[in-house]
Image: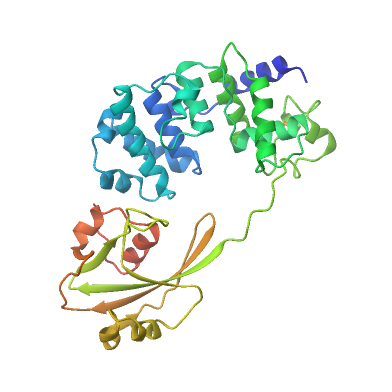
Amino acid sequence: MDKRYFSDKVVEWYEQNKRDLPWRTTRDPYRIWLSEVILQQTRVIQGLPYYLRFVEKFPTVKDLAGAAEQDVLRLWQGLGYYTRARNLHKCAREVVARYNGIFPDNFEELKKLPGIGDYTAAAIASFAYQEKVAVVDGNVFRVLARIFGVEKEINSPEGKKYFTQLANELISAKNPDLHNQAVMEFGALFCTPANPSCNTCGFSKTCFASLKELQAELPVKAKAKAARPRYFYYFVFQKGKSLLMKKRDDKDIWQGLYDFYLVEKTKAVNPLKIMREDASLKNFVEDAHITSKKYKHVLSHQIIHATFILIDTDEPSAKHLKFYTTRQIAALPKPVLISRFLEDQSLAVQS
Ligand code: SF4
């Protein structure tokens, strides 16, 4: 297929079908960057309210850079992948410190910032500065694999390189921003993973997947490793309506968020056995109440099976662990798993 034809056709489709989204009406690299970071691994419908809240609370990159990390994590709460939120904050600080609050205006320089990889750098460079550089996300992989019949694995280094090169050959020099938006939107709304709209598609007569009926087979993806199961036993010390909480500092999931005293196991065990064997817990066996609900929390590469054990206590706060009232807890950044538990126990209040 002629490259120019592909670009013109997909842009034409975009002009008639695009969704009206707030980050599409701006050339402000800060807002474009914010939207792109929020929308990684997140659907538009879920990410939109977060974007609006961030823009309202931090209208400029300087406002975000000046915020406390805890406030950024709290606003991010529920989106998951918290490294993104920490990098967002780090990046804002660097843009202010090194670039006087103005995002660099080209792909290569943007990639030097924390948390900005090829995809985000290409999005900012093309949408804000009209640099001719292609964005390659899941939607782009799918559209190109199907139309051009590319059978390389999209999650292999070779496949990524191939698709990136192809995408960069296809991008229009005249309107790289529109071209990029158009391919992504076409994949998100029209050439969807299941049931693509081939019957009414302008590419159907030339599209490889449509002609060969290979829509379900393309793009090709190597099988991901099975998710690792983890067994979390949370011991929730409760004094009246205050709970003992701990900031997660380890190099692990949920860094910087707050949870409870945690013992992790590689398989399911009896919580009372854990208590008898743990020096900090063994004196509380008599006061322990194991909540009946078991929680399953699915992350991209791990499945958390969580059990919560409530313990009434009069003990004072300990090192790294401090009692917080339910009102204070509401303002802390927490994993969604912890918020679910608090709600189930009627311990959650609105911040
Ligand atoms: S014909 Fe079907 S598979 Fe091909 S681009 Fe159009 S919607 Fe996608």
Q: Give the answer, above or below, for where 23 lies relative to 303.
A: above
Q: State the image quarter where residue 246 is shown.
A: bottom left
Q: Position of residue 181 (x, y in %)?
A: 55, 25
Identity of the residue furthest to the bottom in this view: 286
Q: Position of residue 21 (x, y in %)?
A: 45, 29
Identity of the residue furthest to the top in this view: 174
Q: Is residue 268 left or right of residue 141?
A: left
The answer to whether residue 190 shows anywhere in this view is no
Q: Is residue 42 left or right of residue 65?
A: right
Q: State the image quarter where residue 343 is shown.
A: bottom left
Q: Give the answer, above or below, for where 203 lies relative to 255.
A: above
> Quadrant where the N terminus lies?
top right
Q: Position of residue 319 (x, y in %)?
A: 21, 67
Q: Quadrant of ligand 1?
A: top right
Q: Residue at x 30, y 76 (%)?
A: 310
Q: Residue at x 53, y 54 (%)?
A: 300
Q: State the image quarter where residue 307 is shown.
A: bottom left
Colouring scheme applied when the structure was drawn: rainbow
